[in-house]
Image (cartoon, rainbow, N blue to C red):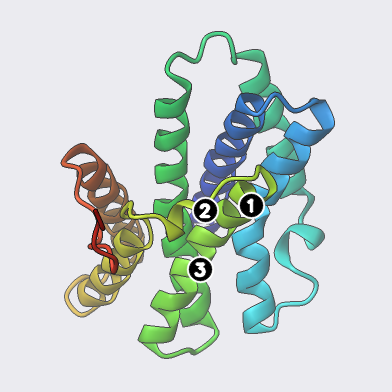
Amino acid sequence: MFFQVVDILGTIAFAISGVLVALDKRMDAFGVLIIAFVTAVGGGSLRDMMVGIHPVSWMTNMTYVYVIIASVVFAVLLKNKINYLRKSLFLFDTIGIGLYTVVGIETGIVSGLHPIICIALGTMTACFGGVLRDILCNEIPIIFRKEIYATPCILGGFSYFLMREFVADTNFIFVIAGLIVIITRLLAVRLKISLPSLYKNQV
């Protein structure tokens, strides 16, 4: 039950981040819905296909569809009340990657995968929806820029398995690992920490 709640919260966060991008691009109602949907289920669909879940989760559980539609309506109705669009997008996107990282890791554990593969699966679950969103909106995906994006997911994943050695409460591990992802991303942006570039500036 707790696992599904976290998954749904991640779906809401990513759906809203998709809406914010689509609104920023001045898309029509259909475009907003599609971008929100792709952002919310893109990473989870990739995760399910990689571990052999068929059909993918959102196709067999209409709750996700209803949640996405409700999130779109909510975000659109409050679009005039959401100040600093970019900051709102960043916040919801950050919450989304934190929640989806632990969901992806847990899916890998249930499938009996190696911890490293579970961390990779969690990172892909968290990042792929945003990649699809940015590509469809004609943007360079955040994960391919200098911003710290996938790194917090990896750090949260390692923390997840480290805590499993000392903490018995799975729900507690879920929450702390997700918070580590979120806080790391927030601090990286706040402190302007980025990955080093492979190319030197040329005069």
Is the residue 171 above or below the residue 191 in the image? below
x then y, percent, for residue 113: 47, 89
Q: Quadrant of residue 114?
A: bottom left
Q: Residue furthest front?
A: 203
Rate crowding at label 3 as few (under 14), some (14 to 19) or many (20 or more) other CA atoms within 10 Å. many
Residue at 66% x, 42% y is 137
What is the number of the mark on residue 141? Answer: 2
Chain-order first, disc 3 or disc 2: 3
Residue at 25% x, 57% y is 201
- Label 1, label 2: how many angstroms apart (C-alpha)? 6 Å
Residue linked to disc 1: 135
Relative side of 115 to 187, left or right: right
- Label 1, label 3: how many angstroms apart (C-alpha)? 16 Å
- Determine whether label 1 and label 2 are within 8 Å by CB: yes
Residue at 76% x, 56% y is 61
Residue at 44% x, 67% y is 123
Rate crowding at label 2 as few (under 14), some (14 to 19) or many (20 or more) other CA atoms within 10 Å. some
Residue 46 visible in the shown view: yes
Q: Residue furthest top?
A: 80
- Residue kind at label 3, given as amino acid type: Met
Identify the element where label 2 is drawn.
loop
Residue linked to disc 3: 124
- Residue kind at label 1, given as amino acid type: Ile
Identify the element where label 3 is drawn.
helix
x then y, percent, for residue 115: 37, 85
